Image (spheres, coloured by chain):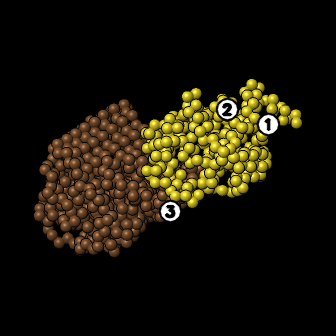
Amino acid sequence: MLKIENLQVKAGEKLILKGLNLEVKAGEVHAIMGPNGSGKSTLVQVLAGREGYEVIGGSATYNGKDLLALAPEERAREGVFLAFQYPVEIPGVNNVYLLKAGLNAIRKHRGEQEVDAFEFLGLVREKMKLMQMDESFLNRGVNEGFSGGEKKRNEILQMAVLEPALALLDETDSGLDIDALRIVASGVNSLRRADRAILMVTHYQRLLDYIEPDRVHVLSGGEILKSGDKSLALELEKRGYDWIKQGAAAA
Amino acid sequence: MSAVAARNTASATERYRAVFDARVRKDDALTAWRRDALQRFVAQGFPTLRDEDWKYTNLRRLESRSFAPADPAPGAIDESLWIANVGMRIVLVNGRAHPGLSTTSPQPPGVTLLTLGQWMENSPNDVAAFLASNSPAVSAFHSMNDAFSDDGIVIDIGESVQLDQPIYVVHQWTGGITSAMSHPRIFLRAAPNSRCVLIEHYVGAADSETLTNSVVTLNIGAGASVTHYRVQQESTRSFHIGHVTARLERDSRYVCQDVALGASLARTGIVATLDGPNADANLRGLFLPNGSQHLDTYTLVDHAAPHTQSNEEYRGVADGRGRGVYRGKVIVRKDAQKIDSRQSSRNLLLSPTAEIDTRPELEIYAHDVKCSHGATTGQLDATALFYLRSRGLSESQARSLLIRAFAESILSTIELPSLRSHLERQLHDRFAVQEISP
């Protein structure tokens, strides 16, 4: 579904991704772990189309398409979703409005009928139950005055409504207490499907106790230094990142 | 500046002598009073950039034009531009009251509504005396209004009268009218403990080329509450000068919501004097210059008494080569202690050629006061734009949403649904998206 080859990305003058390779197949959950500043967030932001980065080499192919050539909204309509590390507060833009506009943009792109207000509310209510969100969320401004946990839950609610084929989760566990983490994780788990891939970026192994990955990659210094199954995460938890960095330097 | 300094502005006002003389034939106290006002106006000259309060607004284009009082015969009127279903309506067409379009009778108990033109006709001497005691002609435009004003409304709200329905004043210019001017005048006296809502709506047909120079005087008695909406939708070929003076007695409350959408050049001046303890003024405004529009807002809040509060929140959104100006001055007089005053000016620039000048100012002569002010001018938040686009919204849809959200926040306190939806529709049209609807 997603194939990244030799991806090199600059932010300003700084080279952040230095030839990254990664392949994620439909149905898989991949976790990218790494120390601060390793390029984890850059990777998912570049994949979602955030401006401010310069791709100087390599490619990212999504379902056979050149992902990097698409505008952010085109990627979204093609089924790419980014759950933000810091969801943006947008006072005055209603949560429901955004969800419905997003969903209809995607449906229209797929040649499907737009949902009407009634149908849509039914759908959202159902997904909100999943995320244990209160109805009052609906008519508030996007993330306006939400707590950190509420914002992250809202991200997963959006994911549940928009039903992406490729979900990119950027530090979705950061700033969550254990109860919120459980809710968010169970939301994500319920969205695991054979035709959907999830790429999650995290600093902590903790998230992987709740969302079990098929593959774990260690990103450090802009490259993937090591990949393995979920046991790699446990090893990282025990030994930290230094042994991998040293191993890479030696090799 | 040197070119401006060299200009003789008196000559621009001088030519209005002939306009005045061509019309005035009577010999009564009102005419004498008007003639004095004309002298004042000619002597003052139009404000220039050297006048601190007009620093950002060049009136050259206005000065180069000659305006004359309009022919009262109304042309075609597009009532669909008006706000629907909102209270008692008084319509002035090309500056003259039009009873046929107004819906003021029967007048509610405790409320007196009088058209100024009729009063001038019937008792010019009384009007002269009234104007003399109610007209602090501070600026040239004020004097000009004094000299030429021949219609308007005098409203008296009796003691403790709670007027539920708004007083809706429509200033309508008809299509095809050019070089016409009007100087409407509104006097409102809200007796103690009364409550009322005044809506002023300035509407111009698209092709009208006019000058509106209005003066509104509000006397708000002890414990009274006046909510004042100004919606300026003049034609983009027109000039609009509006001056509002509000005097607040103790425990009174004044809310002003000013929305500037139209005119080629517009200037709204609002002066609120808090004259008694616990008087509270809340001024809010939105200006949306586009194309080559120049929309200027000037406010002066004078805390003349202790224990008074004021709050100002203004937002501007400038596009094209549009230029917006917000100058807000707050004065706290000596011995006016325990003042609470807040000022906020937030602005959005949508194009590289748009400009907004904002300057909140404080002048404080008392020591026990709480005053804050802040001003920001920026572009649309790139992160918010990306967030919306990452959910599938097109760039133009995302921009439109963010702009409208920014502008509409100023309208959120409007309690009249018909007015609010009228304004939201204007914003929607102004910042429309061509693509999918949600």
Answer yes or no: are tags 2 and 3 on the same subunit.
no
Residue type indicated by callout 2: Leu
Q: Chain of mark 3?
A: B
For residue B434, which numbered disc appears in the image? 3
| Vertical placement of residue A162 versus B215, above or below | above
Q: Colour of chain A?
A: yellow
| Residue A62 coordinates in the image, percent (x, y) | 70, 52
Distance CA(mark 1)–CA(mark 3)? 48 Å
Q: Which residue was labeled with disc 2? A: A208
Quadrant of the image occupied by residue A172: top right
| Residue A140 coordinates in the image, percent (x, y) | 45, 42
Residue name at image x 75 percent, y 52 percent: A59
Residue name at image x 45 percent, y 47 percent: A121
Q: Which residue was labeled with disc 1? A: A226
Q: Nearer the viewer, residue B113 or A21?
A: A21
Tag 2 secondary structure? helix
